[in-house]
Amino acid sequence: MIKYTPQQKSSIYGNEDTLFEYIDYLESCKRRPTFDQEEDLIFLPDHKSDLPKLDNYLKQFSDIGYDFIIFVGIGGANLGVQTIYDALMPEKEVIFFENIDPDQNSRLLGFVRKKYDSGQKALMITASKSGATTETMSNFTYVLNTFQEIETEWKERSIVTTVEGSNLDKIAKRLSLKIIYTHELLVDRYSVFGLGSLFALTACGVDTALLLNGAKEINEKLLLKDFTGNPALNLAMNLFTQAEKGENIYNSFIFSSNLSTFGRWYRQLLAESLGKEGKGITPIYSVGTVDLHSMTQLYLDGPKNVFTTFISLDNFENNEVCDPQNYLENTEMSKISNKTHSELMAIVFNAVKKAYTKQELSFNEITLPKLDAFHIGQLLQIGMLTTIFLGKLMNVNPFNQDAVELYKEEIRNQL
């Protein structure tokens, strides 16, 4: 189980009843058999009706075989999948097309062509709930054009994730591509445990059963009416009250390079869910130990406007000694020689926390016993519940993103 360590005591200014009533409502969502409210996403980990569909899709593609995956998407439709992929580095490589940068996409398509030249075969997945996102639809048509050129079975090897009736759905039907329909009310940035994401993750080799089990298990704690024993409730309370005191920047300080994409996922989740009506908390992320050498001067000696959650691992997979050849012997760095990389990371991490304490900076901790699908599922579930609870505390709707349409409308005006 993930360990959550609160370091900051806060009050919530009498909002206990509101939050506890909301938890009662969430419990009622759990008992409903259908997906008819946005909050139902919380129970996707044990929403059994989708799992037979997943098995059916996976069987279709296992029969034709593939060596790697092309994934086209942006924002929430992409970042959840990429977070888990980058954290676990499963068996099959995934090439993500998430930006419309023409030079980057040209290079990525070059990689795809080289793989085909070496005899490898791909599965192409495109994810867009609305089917109306300019970047995704542009990349979909651009990448599909190349896929048609190099893959004779491109129809059989292409699948889209969308809602029924979308532009993407209509094109997929016209081209006879396979389609996974997502829930109409499932917002993309919360869709990491949705059918489309689970398909992509299982297809590249992630143990999604373990992923869902982790999220399901921690749900029992996340729906407790207990500000000490419920990590999401406690973290939401801390973020809300510290923001009221002027700490309106929230830093996820991640001491694992493999989890760095989680920082991007959580940044979007908080920003797009809570930045409304003149309200919001500005989410950022840092990666230790790299950003100790770029941002720590500001964090430790700049304005005290940042609240931090340190995210770390108890155990890394690699426990090799730092200096097996004793190159550092007889130097002032010789004490490093007999330390493993894991031990050195722990020393640096503890030093950072002590420095934060000396500077009277606000922080708390989330610790994963190890980096696996089970604990990643728990981390993502904590992130989503924390965001939803914050929406209640801030009195904003955490599921809409109306202002995003402002720039999308300007794009349509210029096309």
Image (tube, rainbow, N blue to C red):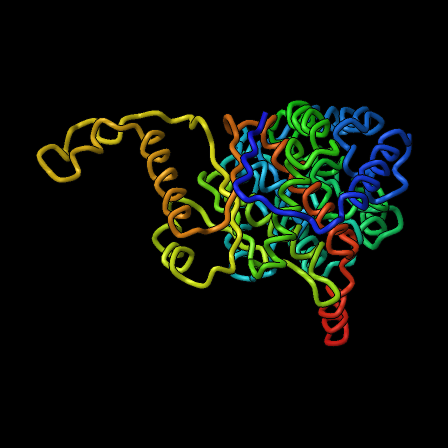
Q: Residue at x 51, y 32 (%)?
A: 367
Is 408 left or right of 256, judged from the image as shown?
Answer: right
Q: Residue at x 58, y 28 (%)?
A: 375
| 402, above or below 37, in the image | below
Work out which quarter of the rendered image holds the N terminus and state it. top right
The quarter of the displayed image where residue 123 is located = top right
Total numbered circles: 0
In front: 3, or 246?
246
Q: Residue at x 86, y 46 (%)?
A: 184
In front: 253, or 406?
253
Is 99 left or right of 255, judged from the image as shown?
Answer: right
Expressed as whole percent of the image width and height from the top left, the position of residue 247 reads 55, 58
| 153, above or below 339, in the image | below
| 179, above or below 53, in the image | below
Do we see residue 159 in this rendering?
yes
In front: 414, or 277?
277
Expressed as whole percent of the image width and height from the top left, the position of residue 358 reads 38, 48
Is 183 left or right of 378, judged from the image as shown?
Answer: right
Q: Residue at x 74, y 24 (%)?
A: 59
